Image (cartoon, grey):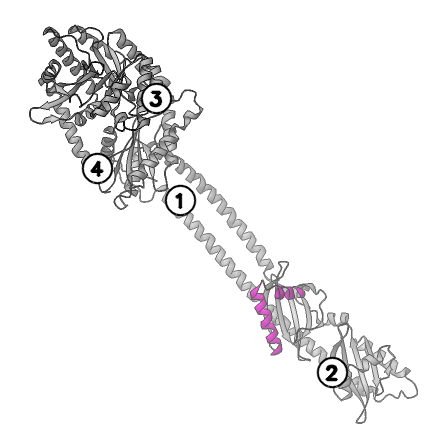
Amino acid sequence: MYKTQNSVSHRRRPAFTPGTQLCILSVILIIIIVLTLWNTSNLRSVLNYSTENYAKDVTCQLAEDITARLESNQQNMILLADSISKIDYSTGTEALKEFLNRKAEILDFDILIFIDSRGNTIPSVSDAQDLWQLPSVQESLQGNTEVAYIEGQSLLYSTPVYSGSEIIGVLTGIHRKENIQSLIQPKAFSGESLTCIIDNSGKVVVSPTELKPFLQLDDIFKSGKDRNTENEIVKMMDNMKSNRDGVFPFTAVNGDELIMSYHPLNVNQWVLLTLIPADLISYGANVYTVKTFLIIGGIAVVFILFLASILRFYSYHRKHLEQLAFSDPVTGGMNYSAFQLQYEELVKAAPPLTYTLIMLNVKGFKLINENYGTAAGNDTLRYIYKILLRHTEPGEFAARSEADNFFLCIKEREKQAIQFRLDAMIHDINSFNKTRETPYYLTILQGAYLIDDPTLELTIIQDRTRTAYQNQASGAHPSCAFYDADFTRQLQTEQELNDLFEQSLKNHDFQVYLQPKVRLLDGGIAGAEALVRWIHPQKGIIFPSDFIPIFERNGKICRLDLYMFEEVCRLLQQWNQKGQPWLPVSVNLSRQHFKNPEFLKSFSEIAGRYHIPQNTIEFELTESILLDPQQIEIVKKSIHKMHCLGFLCSLDDFGSGFSSLGLLKEFDVDTIKLDRQFFLDISKEKSRDVIACLIELAKKLNVRTVAEGIEVQEQLDYLRDIGCDMVQGYIFSRPLPSKEFEVFCAV
């Protein structure tokens, strides 16, 4: 967000803006929610801890109960064995069977079996031999009371039966799986727990009523995905071997949160495992917590909606104000004020020569408004701005300044790279012509300043870019003009020449020099070209290359052309008054004249004032005028008008640029002046053939030919051989002052 200072009102801003107040309220709400979550998290931790301790305590108590029950069963077996030793079953086993069945029912055994020393069982069982071979039975034959698990997860109690001091058999009692499961099932945990008994190697002695949750522990251990649970299982195995208890939570494969508690039994190194849901105790608290969260969430939603409405209202009006202050009404993008702030933020903080400021101007933009309307002009500006943004990189920015001027700040320091990017932008801008039947190419003037001192004020840098583009070289496709120290000196020189112009016109410091045109047919003077020379009383000779481009840019070239035209007319009149014949003279005509459709009127009036006959004065046009697609029709009409007014027209520097022979067909010129570049390598056969073809074509079109810049005899001889009409160059004469020209003609 951009910040501006009101220079009119100095009212103190409130300590807290609406945005700051909303931020503070939001922070308070967040703190409340965080504290609630933290408290809830602590509550869950406490409940989980309590659940684990509860499971551990209940498992410990249950283990003690089971141990006591097993020991009680063993004691009962010892008492029963003592009673059996007193029963005489030698005459029959019915009494012993009845005794065993009755005691089994009383003591809650599934079956009581007496095995004598020969392996016979009372009552008889089918697997008596298997029973006799059990290790625990064999141990009892050695005088030990044992409890062991047998196939089917049944418990087998065994104790020796004595007759005196001799062991005559073993009394065994069996608790089947279902009977034992009811024994180990705790009454606590609201029936939601599962228990089982395993030995210290992990083998199941008595399985639970549902084995799947316990098997998930094995799945977790084998998958290796839950490292914490895997470590707890390893720890549990170590504890069981060391006869230690423990408890740990884990997440089952199906996602259930469970707590495992284990406690050793004082029997055969067995361990009691108890599995309960982790939320056994916290379930009620969880319901309360959920309700609390729903209430807090509801309050938060209402508060957030309230904040959102305020923020939306505030943001809307803030953006509206920012748009008014920092948005361009035409392009919708950054305006000059926003551009200044962006410049202050990025450019002034960057090292020297990081950025380059570029000013772009749409040449002839007023014509778009006049021909197509203001709306079309605005659309064009928006289109250009969109293209400029498309070509910017991060850290670069662009804005429309005023009218059809744009400022572009890019991260470049090499002139070649800058020109390459600008060419790409301009090419993209003119790409709309692909869909137009009649192309309308936009000419973009470009001026740039490499920011070597970021501390300079933006206005100074912008003035330098503006100066650069305003003084760039003219052309159909102008390149970017870069401002530097030489530019300042050049501008000072240009300003000085501009200041001298008016007085020099009055003082006739601009003088006419004439360079003869010689006919090759007979060597006579066919005419001359009038050239301007500026001879200042203080500055001395000022070369045309120094002042012509300046006057072309500022439009003073038109006044200079009229001045030279009148000087030539005056000179021709003076010669005629001396009895000399009228000599054809060609004068240069700047392209700037064609901006005024009536420009020939002034020339015609001057020629009439000095009584210059028709076909005496010839206007020389450079081929670049004819190549401008926006001026083709204007030039064609102007040439026709020249002929109507009695003037001739020649095409100067023919072949120096990109001219084509089609120009001779399109434009009714009287003479073409072949550029000196044609004759530099005249010794080459190909060059000779080209020149000969041009001369031959001109003859067929009834157009006279003049060869410019001829300096050596070889060039002259060849031109005479192929029938060139006239030659102009140093081989005959340099440009001469009028007095010397008269002498030259008289020789």
* Residue extent of the magenta highlight: 215-242
Left or right of 147 on screen, residue 704: left
Please tell me the numbered disc located at residue 146. 2
Residue 596 x/y as whole percent: 26, 14
241 is within the stretch colored magenta: yes
In the rendered image, which residue does mark 4 sit on?
484
18 is within the stretch colored magenta: no
For the residues marked 3 and 4, what is the alpha-carbon distance in whole angstroms? 38 Å
Q: What residue type is labelled 4?
A: Asp
* Element marked by disc 4: loop
Badge 1 or badge 2: first in the primary sequence: 1
Mark 4 neighbour density, 10 Å: few (under 14) some (14–19) many (20 or more): some
Residue 268 x/y as whole percent: 69, 80
User: Residue at point 40% right, 44% down?
Assistant: 22
Mark 3 neighbour density, 10 Å: few (under 14) some (14–19) many (20 or more): few
Q: In which quarter of the image is residue 530?
A: top left
Instruction: Point out the image quarter for the N terminus.
Output: top left
Placement of 339 over or under 443, stated as above or below:
below
Foreground mark, 1 or 2? 2
Instruction: Point out the image quarter for the C terminus.
Output: top left
* Element marked by disc 1: helix
Left or right of 434 on screen, residue 539: left
Foreground mark, 4 or 1? 4
Badge 3 or badge 2: first in the primary sequence: 2
In the rendered image, which residue does mark 1 sit on?
22
Placement of 420 over or under 706, stated as above or below:
below
Q: What residue type is labelled 1?
A: Leu
Residue 591, can we see it? no
In the rendered image, which residue does mark 3 sit on?
660
